[in-house]
Amino acid sequence: MRLDFLHIQNFRKLKNCRIDVSAKETLLVGANNSGKTSAMDALILFLTKNRTFDLKDFTLSNWSAINKIGETWLKEKDPDKIDLTSKPWESEIPTLDIWLHVENKELQHVSHIIPSLDWKGGLLGVRLRFEPTDIESLYADFIKTTQNANKIYDSKKGKSATFNLWPKNLRDFLDKKLSSYFKIQTYLLDPAKSETPQLLTDKDFAVQNEVLNKLINVDIINAQRGFTDVNTDAVEGSGTKNLSSQLRTYYEKHLNPSVNPTKADVDALVQLHQAKETFNINLESSFKDALGELEDLNYPGFGNPQIKLSSEINTASSLQHDSAVQYALNDGVSDLSLPEKYNGLGYQNLISMIFKLISFRDKWMKKGKSLDPNDSEIIFQPIHLVLVEEPEAHLHAQVQQVFIRKAYNVLRKHKNLGDDKTFITQLIISTHSNHVAHEIDFTALRYFKRNISEKGTINTSSVVNLSKTFGNDDETTRFAKRYLKTTHSNLFFSDAAILVEGPAERMLLPYFITHHTQLSSCYVSILEIGGSHAHTLRPLIESLGLITLVITDLDSVIKDSRGKKTQPALGKGYETGNSSLKEWIPAEKDLDKLLATTYKNKEDKNNPIRIAFQTPLEIEQGKKQVKVYPYTFEDSLVLENASIFKSLTDAKGLLKKMVDATNEVSVQESADKMYKIITDPSSKKAEFALELFYFREPDILKTPKYIEEGLLWVEEKLKMEKTGLQIKTVEK
């Protein structure tokens, strides 16, 4: 048995969102404000009692529908004509559908939720819905409260036309009274209708007992762990603030010999008792003189109790201090150690989280003293769901990777677990860290995509299952996955992506971006993929819906020459050898047509994707404009910044050759020479950029025309998205 997928509706930005759950680890990734935290909060609110619902947990666009319900109530004077069932609320209230995959041999676990006696295994669905449970009382109280408020305010002289007493509307009423009228109800779903969220009918009644409690054990590591310096008072919800206190809690639950003692515990308990008696005798002797002095004050007098000193020595009290955990300094000479507060905060957090996972595992498996032999209803849930919010907090990059590599194995390190399928562990992690994402298999990533809604509506999010992005496992797919394994991580947290041809573009592009205020304030990921390979990422980029600029080269070749390079020119029947231009955007191989491509045709018709490649340049020569056709990034950059490059008299290597080319008699001769330099197999383009860094601040360079056009497009797209993300301030 395992969680197969989740379906969240009407919860914050997650209006209608499906999340496929991997068999082991599932990683939630996405840019800021994409819905990752909302998904984790939904699971926590529905599956645990750690937090309570707030009206702001309802999808923002649903507030107006809730207010309309209230308006209907106020307008209609006859309660019998008002629908006081759950039907008007069904499409507005938060829900969580949990779909389990259950084998036929596991029926004993789910006998209470199977749809019929002939069900033989497969999917089983349970809906948790946060709904009004007594709508008639809600209606009556809202009407009464509103009428009273209006009556009071109407009696006031000189009242403001823009002011109303609470409640101004039903949303305002529920903002303060939500918990009084709403609670989570459980419904069983039809497995035959699992593909789309199903509507409940009048025949669907809430299940009275909490059916998931016997199936799923849920544990959480919160993002705000409160695990800081041991000298602070910051605490986590569990009441632990450092490893010492965590160890105490673990000891009390699983190891304390005073609880359900075994034969092996007896000797320790006897010795503790003897130590206590010996110490009490010592206490009485030590305090005899001091207590005797109280007799001079006539204490104890008549009716006053005698003072008796007694120590309390037990196994747990030995851990009741901040130095219970120490770090040994193994220098091979001395036996030195320091209290835990002297270890770095990052490693404290790492150790703390790992130990939490150990504690979660052992609690689930009822290890040690937590297994009460007198408990007649011991439950071993078949699924252990562990939620970890932002494990990267306070952790260095390498430490983040250590945690994510070890976490799942720690949760399975028990004699009854390992590879056994009787008990299943599923780990769901939300993260903003590309280092964490790098360590997880690509197929386990779930990307939260921001959907830009129509003007006047609220933006929502959807989830992309990256395991299904590339389809069949062909050669192109394998290349893309191998590439993404090494460089993909930044892509999943970006506001926009720019795919560049080579190292020179990758190194210089950040300087070009500084000229664009909007781009500089956003997280733009730059990936060096090469123009000939950019199209291999097409399925991923289109699935993510990410604003993407592909910066590539013309790569002009002679037609029918098996890819022989040639300097770009019009009217000679040349073609492009660039696969992205031929197969993606604008899907054209003829060089003349490419050079004539309009601004509009450089953008994908269905996705926010644009391509940028060299365009004809008109450069002043004497009193006239000369048109030249660059071949690649380097000659475009030099031709458009000729005066700057001419000043680099001390240049070396490839940069010197390009500088020398600017001193040719004519612009065309300069372009011809640059083409020969760039296409020489010995040319090292990365060296060109590095040499340029040495001699000049790159930010003084004019951005090549074709790249500037692309950056302006990205900036405009980001402005539109930012505008869409802006939500009108709602009066409380």
Image: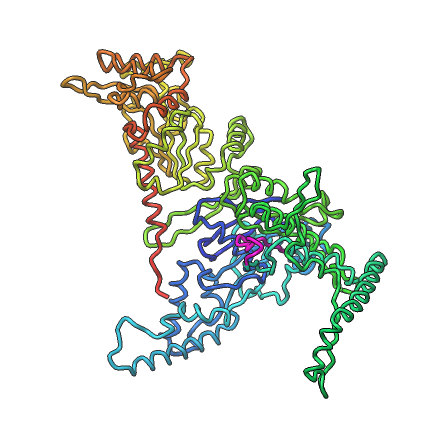
Horizontally, residue 31 falls left or right of residue 368, namely left
Front one among 207 and 714 = 714
**Magenta region:** 217-232
Residue sitting farthest toward the bottom: 302
Residue at 54% across, 37% down: 438
**In the figure, residue 158 lies in which quadrant?**
bottom left
The answer, for residue 156, to whether it is visible in the render is: yes
Q: Is residue 496 above or below residue 702?
A: below
Q: Position of residue 630 (x, y in %)?
A: 30, 20
Q: Position of residue 587 (x, y in %)?
A: 37, 27
**In the figure, residue 482 lies in which quadrant?**
top right
Q: Position of residue 477 (x, y in %)?
A: 52, 30
Residue at 39% across, 23% down: 690
Residue 601 included in the magenta stretch of the image: no
Horizontally, residue 257 falls left or right of residue 241, namely right
Query: Which is the main secondary structure of the residues drawn in magenta?
Result: loop
Residue at 71% across, 77% down: 293
Q: Position of residue 125 (x, y in %)?
A: 60, 55
Horizontally, residue 291 falls left or right of residue 224, namely right
